[in-house]
């Protein structure tokens, strides 16, 4: 026991410990210095500043980790074979190198997506859906290349993975069928674009906006700010209403009922005036196609109309509908037009006293 303590307090142990600490402090000090230089020199381009800082952070943390591996490279467990692929002996060190390559590719993909692609978006005025598609495709391509490079870097012959790929294919056919289906459906959605990021859609009578199209599932944010995660295959197999597909304009119908005896021509005129006022007051209500008043028919307790107006943005349906309902109520009230409600009349028929007396007997 005493010998172990003597070994711990030897000069060589503390020399190694101090060297490692100084090296790590040097790496992170360099990171802070570079951050300071970037902030001071690149003041007017936040995009480049964010990209450089992101890369420096990755290089600092992974560089410190790589330094520790190299410094303690004499340890046997680091290069000891865990398993073999063909003639290649896979060790912890090779796995770490492969992970670092993939991690670098992932970070470069994010940096390039935030640094280069926005300039392309602004120049060609691409919509939000196309931007998301390009980002996903760009990311997938870089990651596939990174995986191939990492495998070849550690010495794995890709032809030796054909048997493994066959086993994976069988696994996909049996146990990973849904995952494979959703992944392929996600690729189809990105290229065919039946839905895209930013679209206002209706799924199972729930209205929401498409936020993300991931590899397996699509994230939808409802108007109540709740998130629905739907498998990608759902959008290819089920009926989905896309209010933003092709033409974002949407027709809004406002039902209006007035009491019997009301001048229907006056009602038509007032609703048309109301639609014109709404069009002047709102950027969402369109002048073309023009508003239209539909005489629906004669209801049980009211004469029924519908006011049709066109909106430029499907996301403003609820707000605009509420505003139009307020306007309809105020307009009808201003002209003393009654808005009826369902009612029933009860008629009591008098009964002959003689008949009543016989019934009691």
Image (cartoon, helix red, strand yellow):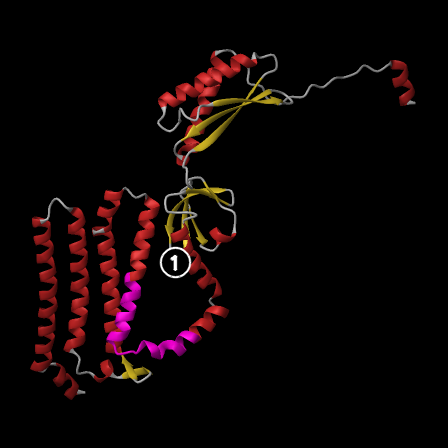
Residue topped by disc 1: 215
Residue 66 percent location from the top left of the image: 18, 71
Kindly identify the residue that appears in the image at 16 percent across and 50 percent down. Answer: 48
Residue 232 percent location from the top left of the image: 44, 55
Kindly identify the residue that appears in the image at 49 percent across and 46 percent down. Answer: 240
Residue 146: say if magenta.
yes
Which quadrant of the figure contains the C terminus?
A: top right
Q: Which of 56 and 64 is in front in this view?
A: 56
Could you classify mark 1 by the number of other residues whose Cα lies within 10 Å: few (under 14), some (14-19), or many (20 or more)? some
Region of the chain picked out in magenta, as a range: 142-166
Q: Residue 265 vs residue 291: left or right?
A: right
Q: Quadrant of residue 67?
A: bottom left
Q: Quadrant of residue 86?
A: bottom left
Q: Residue 325 vs residue 95: left or right?
A: right
Q: In which quarter of the image is residue 93?
A: bottom left
Residue 135: say if magenta.
no
Kindly identify the residue that appears in the image at 42 percent across and 34 percent down. Answer: 249
Residue 337 in sight from this viewpoint: no
Q: Is mark 1 on a helix, strand or loop?
A: loop
Which quadrant of the figure contains the N terminus?
A: bottom left
Residue 227 percent location from the top left of the image: 41, 48
In the displayed structure, 120 sits above or below 79; it is above
Q: Is the magenta stretch mostly helix, strand or loop?
A: helix
Kindly identify the residue that appears in the image at 11 percent across and 73 percent down. Answer: 20
Residue 156 percent location from the top left of the image: 29, 78
């Amino acid at each position: 026991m005493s010998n172990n303590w003597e070994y711990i307090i030897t000069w060589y142990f503390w020399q190694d410990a101090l060297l490692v600490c100084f090296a790590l402090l040097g790496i992170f000090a360099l990171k802070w210095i570079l951050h300071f230089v970037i902030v001071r020199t690149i003041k007017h381009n936040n995009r480049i500043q964010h990209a450089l800082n992101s890369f420096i952070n990755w290089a600092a943390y992974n560089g410190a980790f790589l330094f520790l591996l190299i410094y303690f490279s004499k340890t046997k467990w680091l290069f000891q074979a865990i398993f073999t692929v063909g003639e290649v002996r896979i060790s912890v060190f090779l796995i770490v190198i492969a992970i670092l390559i993939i991690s670098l590719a992932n970070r470069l993909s994010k940096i390039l997506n935030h640094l280069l692609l926005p300039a392309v978006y602004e120049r060609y005025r691409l919509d939000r859906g196309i931007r998301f598609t390009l980002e996903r495709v760009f990311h997938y391509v870089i990651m596939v290349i990174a995986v191939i490079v990492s495998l070849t870097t550690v010495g794995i012959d890709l032809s030796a993975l054909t048997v493994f790929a066959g086993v994976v294919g069988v696994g996909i056919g049996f146990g990973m069928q849904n995952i494979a289906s959703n992944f392929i459906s996600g690729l189809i959605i990105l290229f065919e674009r039946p839905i895209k990021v930013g679209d206002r859609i209706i799924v199972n009578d729930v209205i929401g906006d498409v936020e993300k199209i991931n590899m397996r599932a699509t994230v939808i944010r409802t108007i109540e700010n709740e998130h629905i995660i739907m498998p990608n295959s759902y959008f290819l197999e089920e009926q989905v209403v896309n209010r933003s597909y092709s033409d974002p304009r949407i027709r809004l119908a406002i039902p209006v009922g007035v009491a019997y005896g009301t001048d229907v021509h006056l009602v038509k005129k007032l609703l048309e005036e109301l639609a014109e006022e709404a069009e002047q007051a709102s950027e969402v209500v369109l002048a073309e196609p023009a508003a239209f008043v539909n005489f629906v028919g004669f209801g049980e307790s009211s004469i029924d109309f519908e006011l049709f107006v066109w909106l430029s943005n499907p996301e403003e349906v609820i707000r605009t509908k509420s505003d139009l309902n307020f306007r309809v109520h105020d307009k009808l009230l201003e002209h003393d037009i009654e808005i009826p409600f369902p009612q029933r009349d009860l008629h009591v028929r008098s009964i002959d006293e003689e008949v009543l007396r016989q019934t009691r007997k």
